[in-house]
Amino acid sequence: MTPQRVAAIVLFLVAFLALGVSHAFPFREDISGVMETAIVLAGVTCALGGVRLWLHKTIDPEA
């Protein structure tokens, strides 16, 4: 597995945790709307970064 794929998997896990925190946990009522939005934006950013790393093509030095 390439380092880009490993980093992508880590970012996907962080995005999944952010999704869980923003929707499933009982302390959701205790956090402000701004904090909840920040958690969602962080999750989306991690998911998009993971997709970018997963689909990233390495440059072939022999080509």
Image: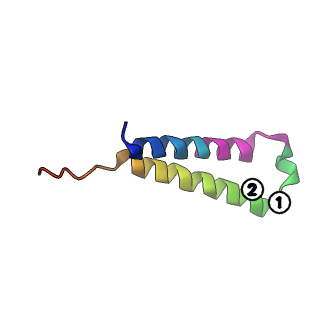
Q: Amino acid at mark 2?
A: Glu
Instruction: Look at the image and say whether residue 24 sits in the magenta stretch.
Output: yes
User: Which residue corresponds to mark 2?
Assistant: 36
Q: What's the magenta region?
A: 15-26
Side of 49 relative to 61 (left or right): right
Is disc 2 placed on a helix, strand or loop? helix
The image position of residue 7, as x and y in percent, is 47, 46
The image position of residue 57, as x and y in percent, is 29, 49
Please rate how many residues cluster around mark 2, counting C-alpha atoms within 10 Å: few if below 14, some from 14 to 19, many from 20.
Answer: some
Is there CB contact under 8 Å for labels 1 and 2? yes
Q: Residue at x 79, y 40 (%)?
A: 25
User: Which residue corresponds to mark 1?
Assistant: 32
Q: Residue at x 86, y 50 (%)?
A: 29
Is disc 1 placed on a helix, strand or loop? loop
Which is the main secondary structure of the residues drawn in magenta?
helix
Question: Quadrant location of residue 24?
Answer: top right
The image position of residue 42, as x and y in percent, is 62, 56
Side of 50 relative to 61 (left or right): right
Residue 29 versus residue 12: which sits nearer the camera?
Answer: 12
Side of 21 relative to 6 (left or right): right
Question: Quadrant location of residue 35?
Answer: bottom right
Residue 29 versus residue 14: which sits nearer the camera?
Answer: 14
Considering every residue shown, the one lying at the far bottom of the view is: 34
Q: Amino acid at mark 1?
A: Ser
Q: For the residues marked 1 and 2, what is the alpha-carbon distance in whole angstroms?
A: 6 Å
Considering every residue shown, the one lying at the far top of the view is: 1
Please rate how many residues cluster around mark 1, counting C-alpha atoms within 10 Å: few if below 14, some from 14 to 19, many from 20.
Answer: few
The image position of residue 9, as x and y in percent, is 49, 40
| Screen quadrant of the N terminus | top left
Q: Residue at x 12, y 50 (%)?
A: 62
Instruction: Look at the image and say whether residue 30 sits in the magenta stretch.
Output: no
